[in-house]
Image (cartoon, rainbow, N blue to C red):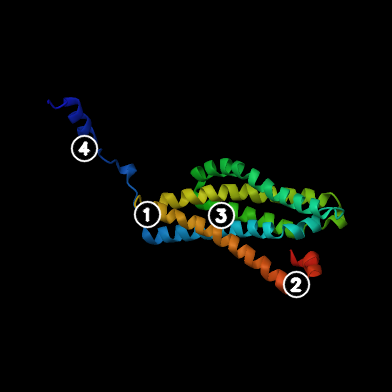
């Protein structure tokens, strides 16, 4: 049986090692890597804390911002505004991704966190449906769009930010801290809402506690 020369050439092709270029080598500063991962995970936790708080307060928010004639419709409307934020997230990624490439991840991530905070702060200032009528759910919807837009830009930017600072060997491990921040933010949001319900009466929650 004769050896196939094509097979030797084929396996030899796998054995050849490509020479690395200077721009293909990632130099990792470990202290900077820790700061980058910590900042990205913390920022992601803050974003998803706000998302989580809104989700766990959906029943209360429905009572505040929507007509009281149908309690079931209130909850459905509250979750509908919750869903809108997820629908605009891809748009946030499309806008803030190129901006991060051009102006730097840190600046864009800081801007998305500020934008998220402004959206959350705005929700706390919106008067109830009893005071301003239909404008209450309209303003709530706009604030939720801002929150979803910022979250869409923050998550992708944070993931890229961590990947750029990590080595090939531990890039997956470092990236997992981003999801840890997501879950941590949701858990913190659930804990905050639970504590408020334990400490305040239903009337206080509807009046000012949800803010």
Mark nearer the N terminus (2 vs 1): 1
Q: CA distance from mark 4 to mark 1?
A: 25 Å
Q: Which disc, if any, is residue 110?
A: 3
Task: Work out which residue is located at the far bottom of the displayed protein and give it.
Answer: 199
> Which residue is denoted by mark 1 in the rendering?
170
> Which residue is denoted by mark 2 in the rendering?
200
Task: Work out which residue is located at the far front of the displayed protein and give it.
Answer: 1
SS class of the residue under badge 2? loop
Mark nearer the N terminus (3 vs 1): 3
SS class of the residue under badge 1? loop
SS class of the residue under badge 3? helix
Cβ atoms at labels 4 and 2 below 8 Å apart? no
> Which residue is denoted by mark 4 in the rendering?
15
Q: Which disc, if any, is residue 1?
A: none
- The residue sitting at 74% across, 60% down in the picture is 124
Crowdedness near tag 3: few (<14), some (14–19) or many (≥20) residues, C-alpha within 10 Å: some
Regarding residue 108, the answer to whether it shows in the image is: no
């Amino acid at each position: 049986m004769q050896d196939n020369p094509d097979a030797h050439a084929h396996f030899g092709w796998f054995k050849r090692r490509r020479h690395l270029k200077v721009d293909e080598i990632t130099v990792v500063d470990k202290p900077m890597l820790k700061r980058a991962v910590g900042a990205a995970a913390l920022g992601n936790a803050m974003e998803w804390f706000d998302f989580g708080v809104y989700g766990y307060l959906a029943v209360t928010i429905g009572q505040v911002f929507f007509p009281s004639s149908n309690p079931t419709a209130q909850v459905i409307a509250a979750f509908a505004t919750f869903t809108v934020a997820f629908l605009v997230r891809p748009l946030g990624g499309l806008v803030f991704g190129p901006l991060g490439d051009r102006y730097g991840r840190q600046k864009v991530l800081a801007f998305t966190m500020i934008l998220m905070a402004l959206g959350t702060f705005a929700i706390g200032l919106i008067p109830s449906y009893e005071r301003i009528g239909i404008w209450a759910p309209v303003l709530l919807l706009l604030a939720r769009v801002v929150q979803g837009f910022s979250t869409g830009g923050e998550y992708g930017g944070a993931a890229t930010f961590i990947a750029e600072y990590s080595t090939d060997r531990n890039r997956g491990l470092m990236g997992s801290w981003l999801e840890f921040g997501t879950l941590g933010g949701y858990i913190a949001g659930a804990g905050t809402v639970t504590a408020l319900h334990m400490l305040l009466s239903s009337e206080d929650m509807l009046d000012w506690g949800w803010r």
